């Protein structure tokens, strides 16, 4: 079965550029989560969606970050403009409707802002 | 300047030994707990879960114990193998629910423990 699919796997770009990360959740899952992982802060929840609707975006660090989920099978996380401190691994995870189910993670996008 | 990162707890064991990884969780109202394994370059991988109405659950070579009195969770790995070397995270579900009473599934993660298994 296909798991959570993220793209790109690696992204290197210069500061000030727009970055778009993509995620395809597992089919049938109705909750989607975006995380950021760094050595300094560990794994942080940025935002999560339930039935394509953003529920809690309090983890989004700044207005430079935005996330959308136009349909049940696709989500994007955008950073504009990007800064070196945004360098991290960004994970997407999804879970089956009803909660109290494990979140399934993609293999992440390793983002480096120069 | 010098960068300061998280100082993760570490556990080193010999191949074949049993491993115990501990986790203190924060919310007494949490109703669901998960252990994840993360290998280098990969996302966290589900190992085992437990609901708050249980105090023990066993899987293949792994056992999770839950002590709600002291808000403590542990993962026991039997006959640890080099392939078990990874960072292990515990996670708790605070039980946030939508208007319809369905849990959102939002998890709060611990900082992780590095397990190293020596052949």
Image (tube, rainbow, N blue to C red):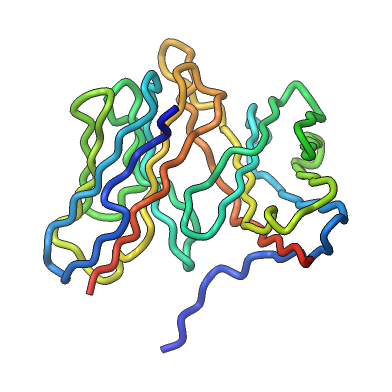
Quadrant placement of the C terminus of chain A: bottom left
At a point 55% along the width and 43% down the height, the residue shown is B45
**Left or right of B48 in this view: B13:** right
Image: A6 above or below B85: above
Observer-nearest of A53 and A24: A24
Quadrant placement of the N terminus of chain A: top left
Image: A55 above or below A82: above
Observer-nearest of B32 and B98: B32
Percent of width and height locating residue A4: 39, 36
At a point 14% along the width and 61% down the height, the residue shown is A81
At a point 81% along the width and 29% down the height, the residue shown is B55
Return the residue found at the far right: B17
Percent of width and height locating residue B113: 67, 58
Percent of width and height locating residue B108: 54, 42
Observer-nearest of B13 and A96: B13
- Where, by quadrant of the figure, is residue B52 drawn? top right
Image: B102 above or below A58: above
Percent of width and height locating residue B30: 63, 31
Image: A14 above or below A6: below
**Left or right of A59 in this view: B77:** right
- Where, by quadrant of the figure, is residue B87 drawn? bottom right
């Amino acid at each position: 079965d296909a798991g959570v699919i993220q793209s790109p796997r690696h992204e290197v770009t210069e500061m000030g550029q727009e970055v778009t990360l993509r995620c395809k959740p597992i089919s049938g899952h109705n909750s989607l989560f975006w995380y950021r992982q760094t050595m300094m802060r560990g794994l942080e929840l940025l935002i999560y969606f339930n039935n394509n609707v953003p529920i809690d975006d309090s983890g989004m660090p700044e207005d430079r970050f935005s996330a959308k989920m136009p349909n049940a099978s696709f989500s994007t996380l955008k950073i504009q403009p990007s800064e070196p401190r945004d360098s991290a691994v960004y994970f997407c995870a999804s879970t089956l409707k009803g909660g109290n189910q494990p979140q399934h993670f993609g293999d992440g996008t390793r983002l480096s802002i120069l | 300047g010098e960068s300061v990162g998280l100082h993760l707890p570490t556990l080193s064991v010999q191949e074949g030994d049993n491993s115990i990884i501990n986790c203190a969780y924060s919310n007494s109202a949490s109703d669901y707990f998960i252990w994840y394994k993360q290998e280098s370059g990969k996302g966290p991988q589900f190992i085992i879960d437990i609901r708050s109405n249980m105090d023990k659950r066993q899987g293949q070579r792994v056992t999770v114990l839950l002590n709600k009195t002291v808000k403590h969770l542990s993962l026991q790995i039997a006959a640890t193998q080099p392939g078990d070397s990874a960072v292990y995270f515990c996670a708790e579900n605070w039980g946030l629910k939508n208007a319809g009473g369905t849990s959102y599934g939002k998890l709060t993660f611990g900082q992780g423990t590095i397990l190293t298994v020596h052949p």
